[in-house]
Amino acid sequence: MNINQQRIASFDEDLRKTFQVVDLFIEDESHLHAGHAGAASGGGHFKLKIIAPEFKGLSLVARHRAIYSALNRHIPKEIHALTITALDPDEAFA
């Protein structure tokens, strides 16, 4: 397992500890940002899609805050940028 796979596995674990995950997809997009100032620090760019019942009734900002809180120990050392799609099951499967 390479370093980015280890990072993604660790992010996955922390998100599953915090949320009752119905579906989760994490993709490393760091290669799209090569040469970017943030990439120099070692932090990667990741894309996250998560479906969890805890997001029901929450605003987009509240959902993002909850995710950043769950991943806080990884920011900014391992995560420099994060693209987030966070849905509750009713939204995802409507």
Image (tube, rainbow, N blue to C red):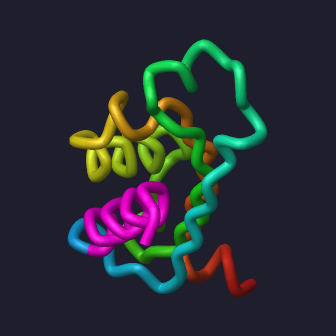
Residue drawn at x 57%, y 25% as measured from the top left = 39
Residue 69 as seen in the image, left or right of residue 21: left
Q: Where, quadrant-wise, is the C terminus in this rendering?
A: bottom right
Residue 55 or 77: which is nearer the viewer?
77
Give x and y (percent) for residue 90: 61, 81
Residue 18 or 4: which is nearer the viewer?
4
Q: What is the quadrant of residue 26 in the picture?
A: bottom right
Give x and y (percent) for residue 78: 38, 39
Residue drawn at x 24%, y 66% as measured from the top left = 18
Q: Where, quadrant-wise, is the N terminus in this rendering?
A: bottom left
Residue 26 or 58: which is nearer the viewer?
26
Q: What is the quadrant of residue 92 in the picture?
A: bottom right
Q: Looking at the image, is 6 positioned above or below residue 88?
A: above
Residue 87, magenta (yes or no)? no
Give x and y (percent) for residue 80: 49, 30
Residue drawn at x 58%, y 58% as measured from the top left = 48
Q: Residue furthest top?
A: 37
Predominant secondary structure in magenta?
Answer: helix
- Label count reads 0
Q: Which residues are magenta?
A: 1-16
Residue drawn at x 66%, y 74% as measured from the top left = 91
Q: Looking at the image, is 47 positioned above or below residue 33?
A: below
